Image: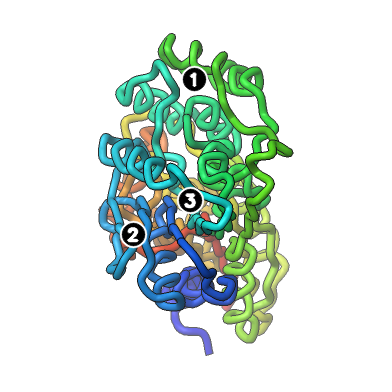
Amino acid sequence: MMTDPATFLRQLFDRAVEVADPMRSLAGFLPEKPKGRILVIGAGKASARMAEAVEAVWGPCQGLVITRYGYARPCKGIEIVEAAHPVPDKAGVDATKRMLKLLDGLTEDDTVLALISGGASALLCAPADGMSLAEKQQVNAALLASGAPIVAMNTVRKHLSRVKGGQLAAATYPARLLALMISDVPGDDPAFIGSGPTVGDATSPKDARAILDRWSIPVPPSALAALSRSKVVPPGDPRLSRTENVIYAAPAQSLAAAAELAAQLAEIRTLGDRIEGEARAVARDQAAVAKDIAASLKPGDKPVLLLSGGELTVTRTGEGVGGPNAEFCLALALALGGHPQIHAIACDTDGVDGAAEVAGALIGPDALKTPGAAEALDRNDAHSWFAKAGSQVVTGPTLTNVNDFRAVLILPPK
């Protein structure tokens, strides 16, 4: 029997996070520990947990991994450095310099294991020649506020970096490099996970400039100059010949696990694991689908559960934090207008929605009893509104990242 809808939806989210935990999922993708010198490097919100999982199998290893503040894990040999996300800071820049220095002088007898997850775009930070950290921070902040999809943002980031777009892999050559990745990008293209530091890049500076123009993203003159000097490594470059990239955890697996957990209690309809778009627009679309389903159900019918993943965006025009999952839930609540049969959850699996230390939110028929919903949406201030409503989902660091998780539950009429 189903528990109350909010508890049921939270259980589904927790299950989606659980199956993506590196301590549960990474070991099966590790080869036998290589002989000779091994270096473990990495970056991302899940990277410290990934390093912990590696040492659980291989024992203490030498290396350096950069993760978000608050996401460190105890490792026996691998050094864990915390830095800022989603806008980089000096700690990330300094740690990246040290990581690159570790790679100096590697030979073809050496092995490098790279652990890459979402968040690496900010945490692995080496501004392009001629750009300061402050200018890199300015560009990152503008990208985050633009509403551009993650693939577009990461295209720009690659061409303004000395480590992304295959450049980290090039720095490990001639050593063998195995990169294990957790995907947080729609479509699971490894070239855009963490801006592809170990993957050859087929985009051009012209592509990056077109993105800046399309989304009206302001950047300093130094960034435009840096684009003309881009050093991304193209696919087929000989320095990538000893690199293998493996995605071992992805959003589809987490949605499937949630669906399996719910299958006995609800009819599952999966809308896709790679949905993109403006959060409030996607919310309106899903509200329309949910209301149509609700109208078709009769008393005694099985509930229907709509599952989806991907990465939504927020074009910030107001003063709020603008987390896409909270904004989705708030726009959904407004579009549903207190519909008595519909409940929903939307959360980021890394526990951080936008720049807020909140995973997301839950809504039900009574959501709009808290006043000011429309005004909060106009201000991109959904997190503040859900805090007042008492329906935030706060997890703390989840130590993984397979992007957004959304579940809309439609109950039959009583």
Image spot of residue 64 (x, y percent): 36, 54
Q: Is residue 162 above or below residue 57?
A: above
Picture residue at 66% right of the left edge, 80% below the top: 302
The residue lying furthest to the bottom in this view is 1
- For mark 3, what is the residue? 118
Q: Nearer the viewer, mark 3 or mark 1?
A: 3
Q: In the rendering, at what x and y percent does residue 265 appear? A: 61, 84
Rendering coords of residue 228 (x, y %): 57, 14
Mark 1 lies on residue: 217
Q: Are marks 2 and 3 in contact (CB under 8 Å)?
A: no
Crowdedness near tag 3: few (<14), some (14–19) or many (≥20) residues, C-alpha within 10 Å? many
Is the Cβ of the residue at disc 1 closer than 8 Å to that at disc 2? no
The residue lying at 49 percent from left, 46 percent from top is: 331
State the residue position of label 2. Answer: 392
Residue toward you, 164 or 315: 164
- Say whether residue 334 is visible: no
> In the drawing, does residue 333 fall left or right of residue 412?
left
* In the image, residue 49 above or below residue 283: below
User: Distance from label 3 to label 1 (Cα)?
Assistant: 22 Å
Label 1 SS: loop
Label 3: element kind:
loop
Q: Tell me where residue 218 sits by quadrant.
A: top left
Q: How many marks?
A: 3
Residue drawn at 44 percent across, 33 percent down: 144
Q: Nearer the viewer, mark 1 or mark 2?
A: 1
Picture colour scheme? rainbow
Q: Disc 3 residue type? A: Gly
The residue located at (57%, 78%) in the rendering is 414
Q: Depth check: 351 or 179 in front?
A: 179
Asked if one can make out residue 249 in the rendered structure from this viewpoint, the answer is yes
Most foreground residue, 197 or 107 = 107
- Residue 136 coordinates in the image, percent (x, y): 38, 25
